[in-house]
Image (cartoon, rainbow, N blue to C red):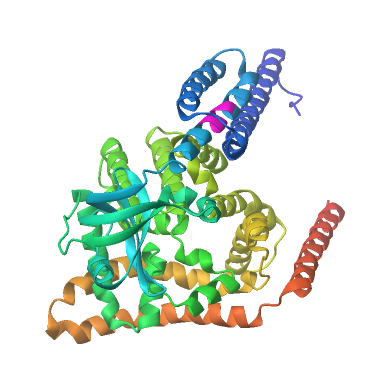
């Protein structure tokens, strides 16, 4: 309402400013909706590429034309055509990528092989992913070959003799997002290996230092500790994996936004000392190095992409809404690597992030109680409700106990992520001196107890988790109580007004 004491010119100025403000809000919301719908079109097109029968060369040509048409539509007056262009971009890009993973080079191979995933023991064999002539093959090595391959790390190069074969049709969709085109049977593997690129060597060296710090922890806690820090769950037992999955805590051992946030928090005292441009460059390098350290899991790629976009916006003095950052990150990653659309971890991480951005503030508005409890509860519910469509569709379950287990375990796991990385590096360096072993054990003792607490929460959560109809009924009760509480608060607010 315009004050009565204002002049005609002031009233016109106020009316004009309000009109401009409302137009800017409308433009912002239209822009946000435009970005979201564009990303949805790209996602739909990429997933629909599985049904497209397009030769690889034609798909590449159509993709280039569609990208050019999308750019023209974006900067021209035909924005409504952008969605169709992006739909074609997704279909052609997905078809081209699918053609590459479905046409492996078959037969005998002898030469250099680059290790793309860390070897691990599976069913009496060493499982590994090797790059042979630019294509990725999953390898199961037994006996002497397995012992020689075990202990190698990503980025190292070994000389192998192998027989390449196609994947079973039932496994193609499972390995698609990892760019695995076939399976290779190792005939021989060299005893020595090349160290690989400097970036890989630095990441492997740091992982080795962290691994040394686990000598002062029990086996189970050590395996979970590495999973919480860098997502290395190779040493975790089947019982531990089942406990975390059944209690809704499996996301803790998948590196994502929380790990990236803690990494930047640890590095913040050094980053803030640099000028804006150099701070941005250092942040980008740190994020890229962290991707290599955590073995480029889809969830961490999504998280680091969002962090990089946020850092760029801050450097440019722009406050970019988190939901827009998520949409841009998803669109960029799908354009770069369409096969990431088949990664369950990628979508779980993305939906959980969307839940935190959209649902958490809504839930926090009508939750009452101590800030530490209402904040933690709204965050947990937002993430769980966000990821629920994926867990129901893929795993067929959404454990209700996850609400309680996340409240009990996530804060402690976050403390482990924040303190465990610098502490693990310090202990790993000190472990070289045998006289300092008691000191190392003492330093790792609080982290051991914290990790054990997270594990116990997962075990108890799995034990008390109801199944089937009971679980669904409990979720229904929670939703009904939330709705009732919302209307109760709305009515009380109306009465007080």
Q: What percent of the width, then of the height, locates residue 457?
A: 54, 79
Can residue 212 be spotted in the picture? yes
Residue depicted at x 22% and y 68%: 148
| Residue lying at 15% horizontally and 62% vertically, measured from the top left | 192
User: Is residue 261 shown left or right of residue 437?
Assistant: right
Residue 277 spot, x, y in % from top left = 29, 35
Q: Is residue 31 above or below residue 406?
A: above
Q: Which residues are magenta?
A: 88-92
Q: Nearer the viewer, residue 167 or 338?
A: 167
468 relative position to 358: left or right? right
444 above or below 333? below
Give yes or no for residue 90 being in the magenta stretch.
yes
* Viewport quadrant of the N terminus: top right
Is residue 417 visible in the rendered structure shown here? no
Residue furthest to the front: 107
Q: Is residue 197 magenta?
A: no
Choose between 434 and 280: the one closer to the eye: 434
Quarter of image, res 462 = bottom right
């Amino acid at each position: 309402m315009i004050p009565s004491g204002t002049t005609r010119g002031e009233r016109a100025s106020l009316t004009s400013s309000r009109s401009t403000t409302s137009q800017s809000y409308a433009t912002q919301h239209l822009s946000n909706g435009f970005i979201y719908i564009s990303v949805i079109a790209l996602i739909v097109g990429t997933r629909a590429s599985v049904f497209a029968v397009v030769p690889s060369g034609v798909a590449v040509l159509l993709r280039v034309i569609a990208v050019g048409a999308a750019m023209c539509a974006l900067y021209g007056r035909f924005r409504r055509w952008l969605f169709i262009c992006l739909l074609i971009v997704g279909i052609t890009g997905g078809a081209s990528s699918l053609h590459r993973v479905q046409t492996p080079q078959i037969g005998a191979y002898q030469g250099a092989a680059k290790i793309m995933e860390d070897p691990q023991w599976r069913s009496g064999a060493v499982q590994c992913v090797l790059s042979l002539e630019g294509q990725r093959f999953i390898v199961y090595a037994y006996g002497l070959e397995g012992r020689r391959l075990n202990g190698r790390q990503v980025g190292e190069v070994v000389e192998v003799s192998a027989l390449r074969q196609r994947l079973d049709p039932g496994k193609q969709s499972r390995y698609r997002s990892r760019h695995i085109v076939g399976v290779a049977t190792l005939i021989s593997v060299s005893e020595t290996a090349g160290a690989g690129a400097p970036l890989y060597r630095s990441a492997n060296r740091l992982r080795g230092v962290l691994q040394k710090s686990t000598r002062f922890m029990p086996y189970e806690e050590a395996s979970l500790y590495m999973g919480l820090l860098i997502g290395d769950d190779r040493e975790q037992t089947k019982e531990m994996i089942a406990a975390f999955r059944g209690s809704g805590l499996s996301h803790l051992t998948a590196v994502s936004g929380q790990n990236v946030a803690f990494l930047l928090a640890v590095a913040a005292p050094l980053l803030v000392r640099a000028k804006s441009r150099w701070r941005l460059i250092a942040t980008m390098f740190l994020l890229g190095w962290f991707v290599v350290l955590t073995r480029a899991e889809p969830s961490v790629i999504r998280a680091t992409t969002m962090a990089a976009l946020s850092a760029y916006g801050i450097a440019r003095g722009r406050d970019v809404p988190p939901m827009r950052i998520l949409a841009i990150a998803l669109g960029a990653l799908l354009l770069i690597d369409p096969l990431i659309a088949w990664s369950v971890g990628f979508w779980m991480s993305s939906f959980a992030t969307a839940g935190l951005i959209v649902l958490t503030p809504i839930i926090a508005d009508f939750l009452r109680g101590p800030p530490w409890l209402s904040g933690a509860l709204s965050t947990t519910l937002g993430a769980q409700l966000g990821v629920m469509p994926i867990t129901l569709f893929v795993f067929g379950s959404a454990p209700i106990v996850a609400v309680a287990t996340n409240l009990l375990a996530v804060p402690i796991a976050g403390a482990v992520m924040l303190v465990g990385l610098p502490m693990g590096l310090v202990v790993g360096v000190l472990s070289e001196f045998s006289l300092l072993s008691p000191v190392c054990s003492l330093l790792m003792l609080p982290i051991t107890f914290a990790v054990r607490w997270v594990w116990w929460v997962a075990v108890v959560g799995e034990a008390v988790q109801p199944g089937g109809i009971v679980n669904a009924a409990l979720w229904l009760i929670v939703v009904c109580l939330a709705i009732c509480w919302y209307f109760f608060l709305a009515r009380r607010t109306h009465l007080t007004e």
